[in-house]
Each structure stands twice: as C-alpha cells, then as structure tokens.
Image (tube, rainbow, N blue to C red):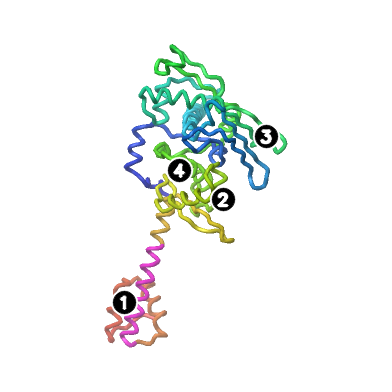
C-alpha cells in the first residue's frame, strides 16, 4: 500500500510551518471526555462511564480557573511528544519532567507569541494544574487513580504576574500519563489538528483517530455514543444537528465522515481514512463505467437483431479475449463479423 495521500496539501504545508514535529497523544484520553470542549469556563463536572460499566472517568474543574479545555490539552500533546522523542532516541531513564521556555512552548503548540498569548498560556497551565481527574482506567474495576494534568510548575523570571518575563518553565506530567507512554498507548496526530478551532471538531477528530484509525472499512458509531465520548454540554438534539453539519462539510483532517444508521435504525456516523474513501469512490466509478459499457453493448447487440440469448457469452468472450469494450458495438453492427462466443 502506498503512503496515504494528503487530503489537504495546501493547509498541511501551512501547518508544517507552524510545528516541526509529529504530535503524539494518549490514545486512552483521545476516545473519552477528559476535557471541556467549550471555550467558556466550565465548572460542571464530567462523569463518564462505558456502556458496560467497567471504566469510568470523573473530571472536576477548579471553581476559580475552570476545567482544563481541549485547547489546553495541546500542552500535554507537546509534553507527550517530547517524552516519546526521548524514548525513540533510546533514552532509558525517562522522566515526567520537561524543561522548556514559554516561547518554545507557544511555538510548539502552534500559537502566537504576543503578550496576550503568554497570558493565555499561563491560564491554560493553571487549568491543567488545578483540574482534578479520577479514573479506574488501568487501575481495575475496584481501584482508581487520581491526578492533575500537570504537577508542580517551576519558572524562572520576574514572576508569574508578568509571564512575558518568564525565562524558563519546568512542567511535570502525571505518572498515570507517563505509564501510558511507556506502555505504548500513544497515537500520532495529523498536524492539521492544530488548525481546528472548534472544540467539537477537535473532540470528533480525536475519537475518529482512535477508533477509525487506518481501517480500510472505517468505523461506524451511534450518535448517542459519539455524544457521550465528547462530553458535550449541549442537548443531544443540538449536538446531532452540529454533527450533521460536519458531515455535509466533510472537512475533518484525514477522515471522511458521513451520516448513516445502524442496523436497528439508530442515527450514526461513519468515519473512514480519506485514502480508503477515495479508493472506494474510484472502485465505484470503475464498476459504474463497466456496467454502462455492458448495457451499451447489449443495446448494440439487440439493435443488430442478434439472438438475445447469445449476448452474455459473446460479451464475456469479447472481454476475455482482450478486445476493447468500445469496439463491441461496431462489431455487432457488421453482420459479416464473426462474434466470439
């Protein structure tokens, strides 16, 4: 199989100018609602449980700072990518601590470097630092792990009230996240993910990346399941309307998405890697062209007043003999022609 064709080459060239690494993310976090997908401050907790009741997540935001958002999660993606790069380089003593500068971090998550960008970066770090997570993922049904998205933060500069003057930052990811990296529960994101401005678009991409992956047949999910996986605060009816808009626009990076239904008639969405979606379209077009060619050949056969019962054998023999399909009609019209059978 050849490499996947870039569905948006122009935009991908643009994002290549913004980040120069292959972003990595936690597969366990991508498929579940670990973050707020709203730009407004969210204080309402997230309580998520898998349909079988085996896995659950509870996320609580700080009343002052609010819950960590899906845009704040870009900082974790950058941290994960740094740690994975160290692992791939053969470093054995991996630590959850990353030393950086505010400028490097902003560039690494495809943000600007204005004074306001520095302020927003510190606000994001505070939300990640104060959001509390409890989950039994990897802990077992009767055990759970509690953590913050970022541990202790250290900085060097004039003070946190003047973020532009910060010369360095030291970030610490939780052991739960580091353990996931070490166990290989990591996926590479399309860099165009950083160009998604909507929270629901980001959440949908993450879910599709985890479940549809590179499966040729793609992945179909009920609308209600997709709703639960995003942690959306919108009513299901409004969420469904927005997903249908996304299906019509079909602008998600890497994955084509279309509205469908499950066998029981439930509204659903089908996601498939655009490479396979394009191949399927080519196959359908080829099949349609072949069918039209056969129908035209049959019409020519009958117009030449030949025996209808002899068409199938003659057409099959013509194609198997390597003759051009378009030449069948001309041969039919020539009563002297000895048609293959």
Q: Are marks 1 and 3 in contact (CB under 8 Å)?
A: no
What residue is shown with label 4? 201
State the image quarter where residue 180 is shown. top right
Calculate the distance from the C-alpha at mark 4 to the C-alpha at mark 2: 16 Å
Calculate the distance from the C-alpha at mark 1 to the C-alpha at mark 3: 68 Å
Lower sequence index among marks 4 and 1: 4
Q: Is residue 170 above or below residue 194?
A: above
Q: Position of residue 305 (x, y in %)?
A: 33, 88
Answer with left or right where residue 225 lies relative to residue 113: right
1 or 3: mark nearer the eye: 3
State the image quarter where residue 44 is shown. top right
Calculate the distance from the C-alpha at mark 2 to the C-alpha at mark 1: 53 Å
Report the span colored magenta: 284-305
What residue is shown with label 3? 139
Q: Quadrant of the C terminus?
A: bottom left
- Circle 4 packing at 10 Å, graded few (<14), some (14-19), many (20+), is some
Residue 224 bears which disc, if any?
2
Q: Position of residue 123 (x, y in %)?
A: 47, 25
Calculate the distance from the C-alpha at mark 2 to the C-alpha at mark 3: 27 Å
Q: Is residue 265 above or below residue 290?
A: above
Lower sequence index among marks 3 and 4: 3
Lower sequence index among marks 2 and 1: 2
Q: Secondary structure at mark 4?
A: helix
Residue 328 bears which disc, if any?
1
Q: Position of residue 74 (x, y in %)?
A: 47, 32
Is residue 187 covered in magenta?
A: no
Lower sequence index among marks 2 and 3: 3
Answer with left or right where residue 57 lies relative to residue 143: left
Q: Secondary structure at mark 3?
A: loop
Which of these two is toward me, 5 or 25?
Answer: 25
Lower sequence index among marks 1 and 3: 3
Is residue 297 covered in magenta?
A: yes
């Amino acid at each position: 199989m050849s490499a996947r064709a870039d569905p948006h080459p122009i935009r991908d060239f643009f994002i290549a100018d913004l980040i120069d690494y292959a972003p990595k993310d936690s597969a366990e976090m991508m498929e579940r609602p670990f973050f707020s997908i709203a730009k407004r401050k969210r204080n309402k907790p997230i309580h998520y449980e898998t349909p079988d009741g085996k896995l659950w997540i509870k996320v609580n935001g700080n009343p002052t700072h609010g819950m960590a958002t899906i845009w704040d999660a870009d900082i974790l993606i950058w941290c994960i990518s740094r740690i994975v790069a160290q692992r791939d380089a053969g470093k054995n003593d991996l630590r959850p601590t990353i030393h950086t500068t505010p400028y490097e971090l902003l560039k690494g998550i495809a943000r600007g470097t204005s004074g306001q960008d520095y302020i927003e970066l510190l606000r994001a770090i505070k939300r990640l630092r104060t959001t509390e997570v409890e989950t039994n993922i990897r802990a077992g049904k009767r055990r759970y792990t509690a953590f913050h998205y970022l541990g202790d933060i250290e900085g060097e500069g004039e003070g946190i009230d003047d973020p532009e003057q910060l010369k360095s930052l030291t970030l610490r990811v939780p052991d739960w996240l580091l353990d996931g990296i070490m166990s290989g529960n990591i996926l590479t994101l399309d860099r165009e993910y950083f160009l998604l401005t909507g929270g629901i678009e980001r959440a949908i991409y993450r879910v599709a990346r985890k479940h549809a992956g590179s499966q040729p047949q793609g992945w179909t999910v009920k609308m209600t399941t997709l709703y639960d996986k995003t942690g959306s605060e919108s009513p299901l009816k409004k969420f469904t309307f927005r997903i249908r808009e996304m299906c019509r626009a079909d602008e998600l990076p890497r994955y084509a998405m279309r509205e469908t239904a499950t066998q029981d008639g439930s509204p659903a969405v089908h996601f498939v890697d655009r490479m396979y979606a394009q191949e399927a379209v080519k196959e359908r077009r080829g099949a349609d062209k072949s069918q039209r060619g056969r129908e035209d050949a049959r019409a020519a056969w009958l117009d030449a007043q030949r025996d209808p019962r002899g068409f199938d054998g003659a057409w099959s023999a013509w194609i198997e003999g390597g003759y051009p399909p378009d030449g069948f009609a001309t041969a039919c019209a020539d009563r002297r022609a000895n048609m293959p059978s």
